[in-house]
Amino acid sequence: MTDAVPDIALEVRSLATGYGRIPVLHGIDLSIAHGEIVGILGHNGMGKTTLLKTLMGFLPARSGSIHLDGEQITRLKPHERSRRGLGYIPQGRGIFPKLSVRDNLRLAWQQDGEGSEEEALDSVLSDFPRIRRLLDRDGGALSGGEQQLLALARGLMADPWLLLLDEPTEGIQPSIIEEMEETLLALRQRHGLTILLVEQNFDFISALADRVLVLERGKITAEFDAAGLTDSREIEEFLGFGGVRRTRGAGTPASPVASRAAAAATPIPYSPLPDLSAGYRSDGAMVPTRPEPQQSARIDAGPTEVRMSVRRPTLDQMRKVVQGLYMSMDDREIIDYMTIMEDTFKAYDVVDSLPDNLPKVKYPRTPGYRPSGAENPMNAWYYKAEVRGAAGGPLEGKKVVLKDNVCLAGVPMMNGASTLEGYTPDVDATVVTRILDAGGTIAGKAHCEYFCLSGGSHTNATGPVHNPYRHGYIAGGSSSGSGALVGAGEIEMAIGGDQGGSIRMPASFCGAYGMKPTHGLVPYTGIMPIEPTIDHAGPITSTVRDNALLLEVIAGEDGLDPRQYAPRVDKYTQALGQGVSGLRIGIVKEGFDLPNSETDVDDKVRSAAEKFRSMGATVEEVSIPMHQMGLAIWTPIALEGLVDIMMHGNGFATGWKGLYVISLLDYHANWRSRADELSKSLKISMFVGEYMLKHHRGHYYAKAQNQSRLLRRAYDEALAKYDILLMPTMPIKAQPIPAADDPLHIHIQRAFEMVGNTAPFDTTGHPAMSVPCGLAQGLPVGMMLIGKHYAESTVYRAAAAFESLGDWRSM
């Protein structure tokens, strides 16, 4: 490798990286001179964003080198690169919608610069006169284009001299795009700004870039200089786009100055549709017919997307829509429909122009940082970011960590998945706001499993989460980091999510108290869903009192979650200390002696049950034969539901009223371009779910939902006789984390082998709590207590009585 040339601003040599074992970039070579603007064109999923993330340090380089102004920065952390003048504006704008424009800018300022915050603010605003007029307006009240200008201004608050800019024109109205062109060119002229720009808008990139590189499948395959950008057809044909995205007419792209001069001289009439007398190429790209001479000015300058905020379909896209709906039409008929569809699309334009309606983000915070090494020995933390709540309240002095599928505005969230890494929420989940309102402090985000599809702790894209009692062993999933941090004593309280046992399983494996409340008791608003009828959120804590206290804070309706149907809340802490005298506890026979049950686990739980008898409770064995079918009933609901809702529906799908986190929906949709990176446990779940939906019409999902009512009735009949049902949380202790080269069946087994007792109660919605009841071979064992719907107080009463017997580790 040659030494970096001093006049070169950025030099990249043989750069390779990927996600997990999936390679994405394959030996990237590029260089950018000081003051140069270089564009990168390419399809979605070709590695453009991955390249920018690697240059900024958010993804580690596997090989190759990065030099910034002659200095080797390949191993530097993102904040160290930022201090050296590298700035990054990610795709999706990344602003705080409920903070004012002024506060959005102030939060982006870095104190390690020479000037003050006010000086940095004045300097940036001098380059963004439109933003200056909007300082007191909430970010969410801005138009999409104004939000993108704000994101750009935020990126410049740290005074970078080299800017990495990712898809800034996506969904932006053309007038703002032109303003952005002017601003970026002015920034280069006034401040010598160097820019690496990722785009798919050909007009925008050709107006700005001195050179354009083509990125395909992680490799740079072509380069076009300014002269080569004068005709988009060559690039179209090279990329096979079927028409690159445009914001001006279909003619030759002009320079920014020339195009704006022409626009000023000749008003352009509004045309709601491209000329449908035009022909279409076989790939669906529109090819205008040669205009009559007197019409040439209008056709050359006439808009394609220019007056439309919502992109219209090409003929080729409509062909695929028709085919996907099992219809047959010739092109002429399709074009007739496309003509009539325009009025409907105008309604979408109106909706697109409206600001989103999101809950207010009430408390200031910073993005925090990603701990590593000695600070994160179990790989349980994703981000540490302290967010302080109200000055007083029931959680004053308490720190809470969030499972990393819970939205915390301004702090990155990946939900264990490489395909979501880089996403930053713009809203706080309801549970977050309630914790902060109660005086609690959010300590950060805890790793979880890849889109929460594992009861093991080996599927997170960054690596496995380790058990606090034995390194190299499963911590339980999918709230793996939450359970490990509480079990290790690093944090007192955590929020987990539970669709098949994902609160109770890590609590059991890690020696913590984990409560899956009644379905709908805790609002799931702002938490990434899997399937609404089994989505639950609840507390994992080191004591029963903390668990009851945290549930008191987060429970109750929020008006934004249709999972909630008149939930009944209680003062759960008041149930503590009442003892169990008079309680009737049923030991569920079918919860023991499962095919994979370990004898020492069953024995520990039976012994714990006897302790209730010694405290005055009535303890009897009860048979619920349908419990043995609970896992089977859960399976179609979970697998078909997750494919339909979480994957095809981008996490939210349709058909319910409540808060849609659109930024998460949009970002998560990217999984399709990187589906090979999905975890093994998610892949097998999707394979089964997709097959059953496609070839069995959703028949078994529907039948399982009908059967779930019978399953609930079976438990309710037992709970009519008993106050509490009792069984092992899991049939096994924590198992070794599978090695990367272990057979596929081992990875799948470790993900699902433990859910037999937990999953049925996600289906029926009963409250169920894992209580640590002893150690077996040095590993924690959990006892599960199940109560009637909304009878969490009774469960806490029993759990607290057991806790009062002494240290569970010595039992």
Image (cartoon, grey):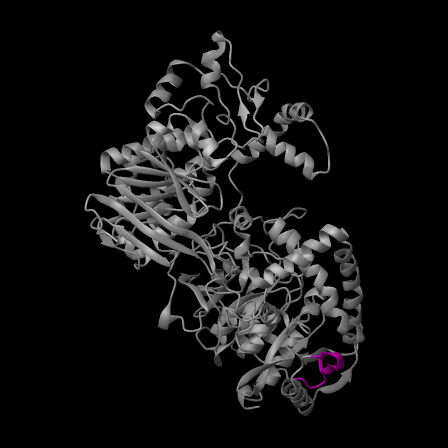
Q: Which quarter of the rendered picture does the C terminus lie within?
A: bottom right
Does residue 347 appear in this view? Answer: no
Is 770 or 20 nearer to us in this picture?
20
For the record, the magenta segment spans: 580-595
Total numbered badges shown on the rendered structure? 0
Any magenta on residue 699? no
Which residue is rendered at x = 54% and y = 91% of the image?
810
Is 652 or 566 nearer to us in this picture?
652
Asked if residue 489 is positioned above or below residue 604 in the image, the reply reads above
The quadrant holding residue 632 is bottom right
Is 664 or 570 nearer to us in this picture?
664
Q: Is residue 102 left or right of residue 404?
A: left
Is 121 or 782 nearer to us in this picture?
782
**Image coords of residue 68 (percent x, y):** 26, 50
Furthest residue in direction top, as rendered: 294
Which residue is rendered at x = 55% and y = 76% of the image?
545
The quadrant holding residue 209 is top left
Asked if residue 582 is positioned above or below residue 409 in the image, the reply reads below
The quadrant holding residue 712 is bottom right
**Image coords of residue 518 (percent x, y):** 66, 66
**Image coords of residue 150 (percent x, y):** 38, 40
**Image coords of residue 602 (percent x, y):** 66, 85
Does residue 26 appear in this view? Answer: yes
Which residue is rendered at x = 71% and y = 29% of the image?
329
